[in-house]
Amino acid sequence: MITRVTHVTVYVRNDEEALAFFTQKLGFKKKMDSPMGPGGPRWITVTPAGQSDFEVTLFNPSTWFKGEEAKLASEQIGKQAMIILESDDIEADHRALQAAGVSLDGGVRDLPWGRDLVFRDLYGNRYNLVQSKQG
């Protein structure tokens, strides 16, 4: 049986700019950056600062695939399913994201179950930052 999720893949256009976005603007930690052959793709993963057992794979389809497969995968950049992230202080995270110049889809929302904030990465993929009510 499936016991846990270890990685989620985000398609990116440029390895370096994606790595910089996740580490410098979102505060993720680089876990892996390994070349997969001479002049070829890189295996790049980042983790949220407080969760080293879960990795986001920054995957550049133009370096991994060729021809039609590369074209089709690259067309998915910025159109991927929303990833949900957890916050323990959504107001502080909101201020930090604003200060870092991250694109926000509005402000913090109060909802029956807690609070959330939607932001986008540099390619337009959406992320939902949530803080559940305590107790």
Image: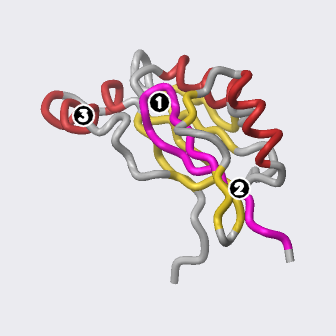
Q: Residue furthest bottom?
A: 1
The reply, left or right, for residue 83 in relation to residue 12 is right
Quick one: label 1 or label 2, which is nearer the N terminus? 1
- Report the magenta stretch's main SS: strand
Q: Tell me residue 43's x, y (percent).
A: 52, 34
Looking at the rendered image, the disc whose residue lies closer to the viewer, 2 or 3, is: 2
Front residue of 59/35: it is 59
Q: What residue appears at the point 60 percent right and 70 percent down from the top-left corner?
A: 4
The reply, left or right, for residue 50 in relation to residue 124 is right
Q: CA distance from mark 2 to mark 3?
A: 28 Å
Q: Which residue in the protein does label 3 denote? A: 75
Q: Which residues are magenta?
A: 117-134
Return the mark for residue 36. Answer: 1
Give the vertical position of 56 relative to 86 (above or below). Answer: above
Give the vertical position of 78 relative to 109 (above or below). Answer: above
Q: What residue appears at the point 55 percent right and 18 percent down from the top-left corner?
A: 16
Q: CA distance from mark 1 to mark 2?
A: 32 Å
Say what secondary structure mark 1 lies in.
Answer: loop
Q: Quadrant of residue 116?
A: bottom right
Q: Quadrant of the C terminus?
A: bottom right
Q: Which residue in the protein does label 2 denote? A: 86
Q: Is residue 41 visible?
A: yes
Residue 17 lies in the magenta stretch: no
Say what secondary structure mark 3 lies in.
Answer: loop
Give the vertical position of 35 relative to 1 (above or below). Answer: above
Q: Amino acid at mark 3?
A: Glu
Q: Amino acid at mark 1?
A: Met
Q: Quadrant of residue 107?
A: top right
